[in-house]
Amino acid sequence: MPTALVINPNTSNAMTADIRNTAARVFQSPWKVVVENAPAGPESLESWRDYHLASVTVLPLLESHADCDGIVLACFGDPGLFLLKEIGRVPVIGIAEAAMSVAILLGGKFGILAGMRRAVQLMDSMVRTYGLEARYAGTVPLEMRVLEFDQDRKATLQVLEQAGRHLLAQGADVLLLGCAGLTSYVKETKARLGVTIIDPIEAGCRLLIAIVEAGLNVSHEGIYARPAPQRMHNMDSFFNEEMAQLFRGWQAEGEP
């Protein structure tokens, strides 16, 4: 029975529950799915500080679920994705990279619906990193904090519709919900706008199934090569003993 580990890299129990609902719908028998949030860190990820903190706090989950067959990183910022691909032994799917990959198969240009105005620059940066600027119509902010999405469902849907129409006017023909916390809004938003809308959680989960069942994995020959042996100083005083040991273990064999 293959097992998927879906990681919510923030500490919001409510968002983890939403992610769990979507993942449980996608992963059918013979798959088993385990959904965990970060054991520590920010309740929502809305800045570079949050992203970088989360990229470290999720690392113990790789050890506690070392028997999993694949990992979905369930935050649209893909925080720490390259690190997880570099050190992981199984396929790792970031939901933003997954959603963008699906979007360019389904339309000419994609647009992203995100939280606050700050998110526009974060999304622009990520799209450049993935080399997809030519297929990107832009990001429109909802002007809502991530943890506000579920406070007033009717109001959130109205804002999603308005922002979606703005993106369509900018030339997008595929829309991405740019936050894991929006996963429960896909059907209603699609009904209002009548266009292709991608739920990144579902896209990431379905791509993981396809990749694992095809027997594929991350290449460790190029950009995701195992870290070279490295002397690490003062790790025990900076991290707790468990984290220090994990960092020592996640490198190629041999001495520097």
Image (cartoon, rainbow, N blue to C red):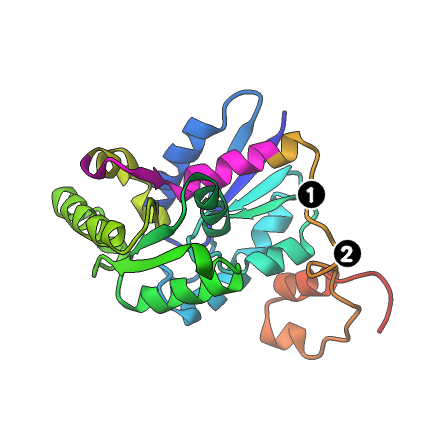
Label 2: state its secondary structure.
loop
Q: Main secondary structure of the magenta part?
A: helix
Indicate the position of residue 24 as horizontal and vertical percent values.
Answer: 43, 30
Label 1: state its secondary structure.
loop
Q: Which stretch did the figure color magenta?
A: 192-210
Query: What residue lies at 42% left-to-right and 53% top-to-bottom?
Result: 76
Q: Quadrant of residue 239?
A: bottom right
> Badge 2 is on which residue?
221
Query: What residue lies at 84% left-to-right and 74% top-to-bottom?
Result: 256
Indicate the position of residue 99 as horizontal and vertical percent values.
Answer: 45, 45
What is the number of the mark on residue 41? Answer: none
Q: Specify whether residue 124 is in view.
A: yes
Are the residues at dot 1 and dot 2 in contact (C-beta closer than 8 Å)? no
Q: Specify whether residue 178 is in view.
A: no
Closer-to-camera residue (43/90): 90
What is the number of the mark on residue 217? Answer: 1
Outermost residue, top direction? 29
Count the marks. Answer: 2
* Residue 211 placement, left or right of 147: right
The CA distance from mark 1 to mark 2 is 12 Å
Residue 209 within the magenta-colored segment of the rendering: yes
Q: Vertically, is 209 above or below 114?
A: above
Amino acid type shown at disc 2: Glu
Query: What residue lies at 41% left-to-right and 47% top-to-bottom?
Result: 108
Outermost residue, right direction? 254
Q: Quadrant of the N terminus?
A: top right
Q: Vertically, is 214 above or below 161?
A: above
Closer-to-camera residue (124/62): 124
Amino acid type shown at disc 1: Asn
Query: What residue lies at 49% left-to-right and 28% top-to-bottom?
Result: 27
